[in-house]
Image (tube, rainbow, N blue to C red):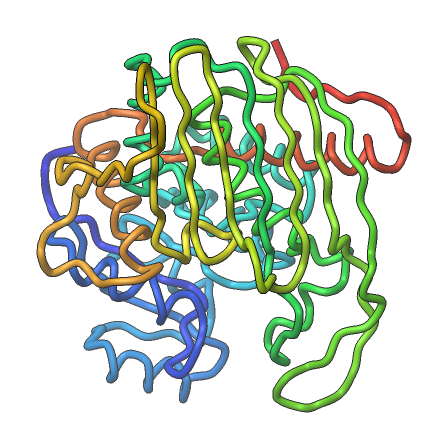
Amino acid sequence: MENKTIRVGIIGVDVNRGWASMAHIPALQSLPQFKITALSSRTKEKATAAGEKFGIEHTFDNDHDLVTSREIDLVVITVKVPYHKELVTAALHAGKKVYCEWPLGNGLEEAVMLDELAREKNIYAVTGLQTQSIPAINYIRDLIKEGYVGEVLSTSMIASGGFAEVDQANAYTMDQKNGASMLSIVLGATVHAVCYCLGEFKELTAVTATQRKNIVIADTGTSIPVTIADQISISGIMENEVIAAIHFRAGASRGTNFLWEINGTEGNLQITADGGHIGFYPVTIKGGKGTDKVMAELPVPEEYNWVNDEAPKGPAFHVAQHYTRVAKDIHEGTKLCSTFEDAVVRHRMINAIETAAASGTKQSYLVF
């Protein structure tokens, strides 16, 4: 594809809330490689209001008209997880490139089916696992590759995964059948960054529990039952024989909310943040090696910022970083962004964690 502006249509835009308005639209509007040409919402009124607010020309109250529009090259899907399968399938059948938010599907089976469809049609299809595009994560990855810690021996992580309370719009995430839990979203996205830096798990064991049986919906004051795991502990052996231990817990701690350590034969790295979803919080890196007696902060070099000065702050910044890789993939044929195939690997990991916790046995998810 020649180096021209990529025309984007976004499914699932609400003028007042939601991930599209919070992250995707400001990210895309800051990047000259893209132009948002269309969006859809549940009603004509909502679509028109969003179009007027964000200055988007074409608005639809149905998804069919958007995915079939000749004004769109890339369809971005930002709706709730249970609707991903239907909408991704429609976009692929319409011959559109696809960016689907994470998780790709409601469980492994849907993710595999969508990946197979994208392969069958030979269409560029990526997911919102933007934690692999965070500047700090890429710096950590390069430090490890360059031997900062020597041979990696072990890694450990403790993290708070949020969800101590939810609003009505996100209450569906408390129901396991909807595929949008702390395990799939928060742990899945953050551990994706761990695997991006250190490799996949060769085998793992897990313990999960639902400690909070009910949760309060913040905007209504009502209580609903919780069926997702709010305590998740994983241990295992990663590629290159790295020993790993990871614990995610719901809510927020008065102490540590995110601590990730990487220990090697020559040095150590320590990564901290204010919460367990590292796509939402600034990350601090400290390191020490050789004769160092203590760790010192390692500022992320400017070369890891791939966006321009107009880039938004907060979570939208990392989405913008991810979109720079989308543009490079489309224009130059690279494979830098997290593809549907990558998403299937992460879904396999989640499935392995669930199976290990239910059966009490070691699990492997790598397919050779």
From the viewer's side, name the closer residue of 70 and 36: 36
Q: Does residue 110 appear left or right of residue 334 in this picture?
A: right
Q: Residue 325's x, y, as percent?
A: 26, 37
Q: Quadrant of residue 168?
A: bottom right
Screen quadrant of the N terminus: top left
From the viewer's side, name the closer residue of 181 and 69: 181
Give the answer, above or below, for where 320 lies relative to 222.
above
Q: Does residue 45 appear left or right of residue 356 in this picture?
A: left
Q: Does residue 286 appear left or right of residue 349 in this picture?
A: left
Which residue is pictured at 68% across the width and 53% down the height? 249
Give the answer, above or below, for where 129 lies relative to 177.
above
Which residue is pictured at 56% across the width and 20% down the height? 154
The count of marks equals: 0
Q: Residue 240's x, y, as percent?
A: 53, 9
Screen quadrant of the C terminus: top right
Q: Residue 339's x, y, as percent?
A: 43, 33
Give the answer, above or below, for where 120 lies relative to 127.
above
Q: Residue 295's x, y, as percent?
A: 35, 33
Give the answer, above or below, for where 231 lies relative to 43.
above
Which residue is pictured at 83% across the width and 59% down the height? 211
Which residue is pictured at 69% across the width and 22% down the height? 236
**Residue farthest toward the right in the current orientation of the protein:** 359
